[in-house]
Amino acid sequence: MNPARVLRTGREPVLTPDLEFEREGFVANVIFPTAVVEIEDRLLIYYGASDKYSAVVEMERTEVLGVLE
């Protein structure tokens, strides 16, 4: 696998900074995924927020793929 190869892109972001800890901090309004764990049809997306916190969100695989082209 080549991690530099782009398979799909989306017009809208999959994740957006909505929660207070994502919007306020060292670098405000910034979140960035760092890892994805796939468990059956669910994805655990680990991400950094405001360059200060780490968090995880659980999403359905179809929900994520639905925004990608």
Image (cartoon, rainbow, N blue to C red):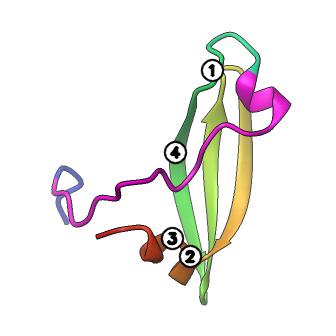
**The N terminus is located in which quarter?**
bottom left
In this picture, residue 63 sits left or right of residue 3: right
Q: Amino acid at mark 1?
A: Asp
Q: Amino acid at mark 4?
A: Thr
Name the magenta segment's main secondary structure. loop
- Residue tagged 4: 34
CA separation, marks 4 and 3? 15 Å
Q: Is residue 18 above or below residue 21?
A: below
Q: Local crowd at mark 1 within 10 Å, few (<14), some, or many (≥20)?
A: some
List x then y, in percent, for residue 4: 18, 50
Q: How many marks?
A: 4
Q: Local crowd at mark 4 within 10 Å, few (<14), some, or many (≥20)?
A: few
Q: Local crowd at mark 3 within 10 Å, few (<14), some, or many (≥20)?
A: some
- Residue tagged 1: 51
CA separation, marks 1 and 3? 23 Å
Given residues 69 and 27, the one toward you in this image is: 69
List x then y, in percent, for residue 51: 63, 20
Q: Judging from the image, what secondary structure is the residue with disc 3 in?
A: helix
Residue at image x 43%, y 75%?
A: 65
Callout 3–callout 2 Cβ contact below 8 Å: yes
CA separation, marks 1 and 4? 12 Å
Q: Judging from the image, what secondary structure is the residue with disc 1 in?
A: loop
- Residue tagged 3: 64
Residue at image x 54%, y 61%?
A: 36
In this picture, residue 67 sits left or right of residue 53: left
Q: Amino acid at mark 3?
A: Val
Given residues 10 and 50, the one toward you in this image is: 10
For the record, the magenta segment spans 5-23
